[in-house]
Amino acid sequence: MTTERTPLKIPKAELHCHLEGAASPDLVRRLAKRNHLALPSSLFTEKNDFAWSDFVAFLKAYDVASSAIRTPEDYRDVTYEYLVASAAEGVIYTELMASPDHAAASGLGYDGMLEGIVAGINDARPYGIEGRIIMTCVRHLGSDRALGVARQVAAGPHAYIVGFGMGGDENKYRPADFQPAFQVAVDAGLSCTCHAGEVAGPESIRAALTHLPIKRVGHGVRAIDDPNLIVQLAEQGIVLEVCPTSNIATGVFSSYAEHPLKALRDAGCAITLNSDDPPYFKTTIGREYQIAADHFGFDDIALRDITHTAIAESFADPELKIRLLTRLNS
């Protein structure tokens, strides 16, 4: 289904964007040059896109590109440039998923990473966008590393850090293995989310809901394979951080026609729209809203409702939520 509407003027909010994965190929090249780092030519295509072929190759390309982000200034620039570009598309709030493990792998400590992200958020605020941080562990690095990240976050709190999450290879380890890490985050006052039901099936979502104190599910689209799970998600008000173009690019679904975005929403699930790792999938958050209109038939009322859900179910403090909802409804 297509439409001539352009929903760029609709205020938008994003809950699922990996900060390291938001750096464009041009920015990654600039950071590598700044840091005197030689990147492998295989990281890029002839058209200067990131080169990868499947989900595992995507994770490897992501790690290589992230290695160019090495200083607080680098993290500031990645944060600032993404938020400013998002603001130009009407985004008023973004939760950025940041990975202390990736920073550490590049030789940067937690405090330096946080300093850079905070500076980027503050510098982007004049453009009318608010940013907050979800610190994430990496699933395929194991539960011990995850617990270390959670303890790091708990020991170094900041008003901009509002959540804790887990990304990485969903087929590695069990959600139950990460319960101690998530408990540390909850005890530190953080709300939680977790990738599940992306490359793995609905059983991955069930396990995450059973063993982890999560309020949202990253992706969650494979719930479509289990009608009982869909009912559970709807009844419990579990929010799905849906990333349609990402799911197409990584082969979770073959086309927008097969993607369950509308079916999940029609079944009563709370959904949000997100870009995930936008330059890797040649998308933006504005494009995801446009795709929802063009391919799924969402009108302006539906798109505003999605933004309302994202703000209301964000991990932002109540005062900020009120300000954002006021902007949405004005």
Image (spheres, rainbow, N blue to C red):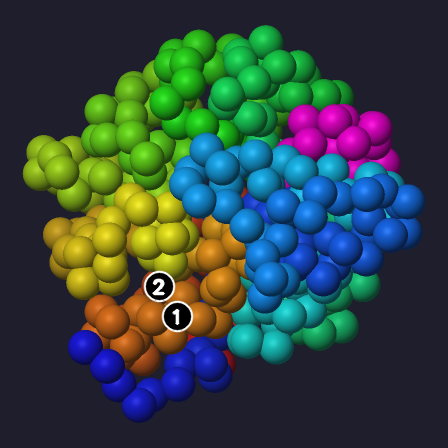
Q: Secondary structure at mark 2?
A: helix
324 in relation to 300, above or below? above
Mark 1 vs mark 2: in front? 1
Coordinates of residue 77 in the picture (x, y in percent): 79, 57
Give the image quarter of residue 65: top right
The CA span between labels 1 and 2 is 9 Å
The amino acid on which the numbered mark 2 sits, given as a three-letter code, is Ile
| Residue occupied by mark 1 | 289
The amino acid on which the numbered mark 1 sits, given as a three-letter code, is Tyr
Apparent side of residue 249 relative to residue 151 in the rendered image (left or right):
left
State which region is magenta.
97-113
User: Quick one: label 1 or label 2, which is nearer the N terminus?
Assistant: 1
Q: Which of 137/182 is in front?
A: 137
Find out whether the residues at labels 1 and 2 contact each other: C-beta distance under 8 Å.
yes
Q: Is residue 104 magenta?
A: yes
Is residue 238 visible in this depiction of the protein?
A: no
Q: Which of 90/138 is in front?
A: 138
| Residue occupied by mark 2 | 306
Is residue 329 visible in this depiction of the protein?
A: yes
Q: Quick one: which residue is furthest to the bottom in this view?
A: 4
Q: Residues within 10 Å of mark 2 (few under 14, many from 20)?
A: many
Coordinates of residue 167 in the picture (x, y in percent): 49, 32
Q: Is residue 258 magenta?
A: no
152 in relation to 99, above or below? above
What's the residue at 90%, 51% (across, down)? 34
Coordinates of residue 165 in the picture (x, y in percent): 52, 32
